[in-house]
Image (cartoon, grey):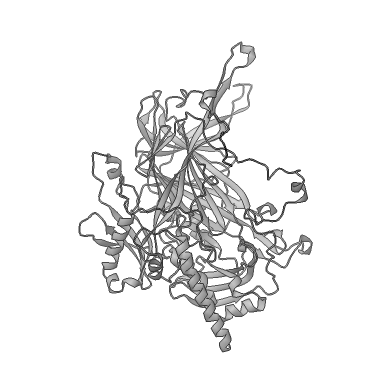
Amino acid sequence: MDHSTSLLRLIFLALGAALVVLVVRSSFHLPDGIDATTAAASSLFDGASCTRFSPWACRQQGRRPSSRESDVPRHPLDPLTVSEVNRARELLRAHPPFASAPSSLFVHSLELDEPEKAVVKGWRKGADPLPPRRAVAVVRFRRESHVLAVDLSGGGGAVTPLPIPASGYPMMNMDEQTSLCFVPFKDAAFNASLRRRGVRPSDVACLPISLGWYGPAEENRRLIKSQCFSTEGTANFYMRPIEGLTVLVDMDTAEVLHVSDRGAGIPIPAAANTDYRHGHSSPPTSAEAQGWLGFQKVRAPSMEPPAGSPGFELVDGHTVRWGGWEFHLKPDARAGMVVSRARVQDPATGEHREVIYKGMASELFVPYMDPTEAWYFKTYMDAGEYGFGLQAMPLVPLNDCPRHARFLDAVLVAADGRPYVRDNMICVFERYAGDIAWRHSESPITGMDIRESRPKVTLVARMAASVANYDYIVDWEFQMDGLLRIKVGLSGILMVKGTQYSHMNQVNQNEDMYGTLLSENVIGVIHDHFVTFRLDMDVDGADNSFVKVEMARQDTAAGESPRRSYLKATRRVAKTERDAQVRLKLYEPSEFHVVNPTKKTRVGNPVGYKVVPAGTAASLLDPEDPPQKRGAFTNNQIWVTPYNKTEEWAGGLFVYQSKGEDTLATWSERDRPIENTDLVLWYTLGFHHVPCQEDFPIMPTVSSSFDLKPVNFFESNPILRQRPTRENDLPVCAAATGTTAA
């Protein structure tokens, strides 16, 4: 390599470093008194925070200035405040052996260590002081992982080591996710591959991709693979993959270990028609221009409820009250959004009755179905590897959430332990979509002029995580009849591979492309999405049981009835964990109830809630396939385990490069008793995604959901007394008048 080329490379790297500093300044609002440049310089690789796939565009739009310096916790479950994070950082850096080299200490997670359930449930606002505040820190120091409890209660500030898993590594922090984007450019073989393709390094974005675990080659060092895209001519660089170019990197040393180039002869797809931004997309078609299609003429809809509906309160920053519901809501760096202490008011007694102690997304498993060299390892665990909450971007007012929404910020933690604020991470709003809560109209033959109908107004708590190309929208929707709907929407941009094909007539008849040809030289690869929710159910208290109500055909006896058969429901109480494992079957239907056998209705039924599955998908991978061993928590759609505070993450505490020996599936094999005890229900929403051309260049949202529905929980319809909406309840709009100065 000649000296002029070396000089140009040094100049390019220097410009890249300057860009990182600029991105840091534009991306973050840090609490007052913390300079962004100082915070970045003390981090792992002097990197900014961004999604795992966007080093050149890691900017957060629409940020509003905010400072959480003065925040104090008001509830035992409130997340760590800025001052508490700073205090925890001081204690960690002073703790042996970290004190000997505090700049070598890197924080991967720092969250509230929630008090024991009995303490939280016994606490009364205004009457009791807050329980002692503690944090749990997951850190790396000189290539070793540590889990520590940190006492923040104002005493000695003890830091106590906790057990660590047998395999795997902690969730990546944002600093290293960003800095790893730049590592491939240090390697000569990588740059030679770019030159052979005629691609300028300044037009390349390289993205760190978790590589799973496939045996000894993935042990004893933290590894990641990096793949690259051309940013030339479009903001949607995901649609311009440099196919077959894969860089293996040691995360701890930022060393390139191997470069694989299997993409000879595969062109980089063109940039034309890939930009999805308003004002940057392709011009309208002739049909649109002539008004045959009305896509540009649809007015902005209103999601606002009728005037006079209950409204909602956001108390002390994290407690939500609405329509008889009361619950605690907070952001979480790994889970994204956590709903706790969800209680609903009984209209007959006025009592607030328990439903869920804690609910959250525990893990996401996203395996791609291409076994080739450049794709086989793409089997992401988005929560445990990247942080579902870390990837949650600020919500866009009027588009992500209606104008009357209230927003919650998150205090997140950088690699050096300093706090920073992610604005507008969660929104809460009432929704009126024109649905019906209940209705009945009498037929004219009865002579009764009855037309009764009630509008359905619901409350939604929402977050949206932009895990690089994909966007996940998670809604917890609370209804006035006591029903809870948990919904996941998928949008964003497909992960695609480059191909030499520009038309299906070029493809051999029996060739497996592992996906769909979406555009010239672009294949959308088939993949699955599984989102596993952890639901710590406390239905009217902690003494709960899981009941399968199995439905099957019952044949009538000869001469018993003109009918030959009918549907019979049989209730079976699950005694142990294995009894409660459920794989949904269309022709073997069941209902799945969580009941409190110690609490009965007036007529003697145990009070309960039931899981109502919706459209879902099951994993079709071989159970011994390494990705499925790590994702074994998707082997069933429903699991039930006894409550254990340490069993929160379906894929294990350390997911990155784990072998899958510490998952929900392994816990459940203990077959512990679950009858009449404090239990946790796990439910997995699944999506099979065979891409289609409508998903190009950005996909419309698809969604699936499941319900938690009262079953004999109330004595009767809990919204029977809801009054109808009348004309004078609706807002009255009039044109504004005034004069314009000359």
Q: Is residue 622 visible?
A: no
- Residue 474 percent location from the top left of the image: 50, 47
- Outermost residue toward the right? 505
Residue at left offset 30%, top offset 56% = 84
Q: In this view, does 63 lie above or below 656?
A: above
Q: Is residue 8 visible?
A: yes
Q: In which quarter of the image is residue 140?
A: bottom left
- Residue 556 percent location from the top left of the image: 59, 26
The foreground one among 608 and 401 is: 401
Disc count in the image?
A: 0
The foreground one among 241 and 541 is: 241
- Outermost residue toward the bottom? 2
Residue at left offset 37%, top offset 39% = 538
The foreground one among 483 and 78 is: 78
Q: Is residue 137 found left or right of 245 in the rendered image?
A: left
- Residue 59 percent location from the top left of the image: 51, 60
Q: In this view, does 561 lie above or below 305?
A: above
Which quarter of the image is occupied by the N terminus? Answer: bottom right
Q: In this view, does 277 lie above or below 141?
A: above
Q: Is residue 207 found left or right of 659 in the rendered image?
A: right
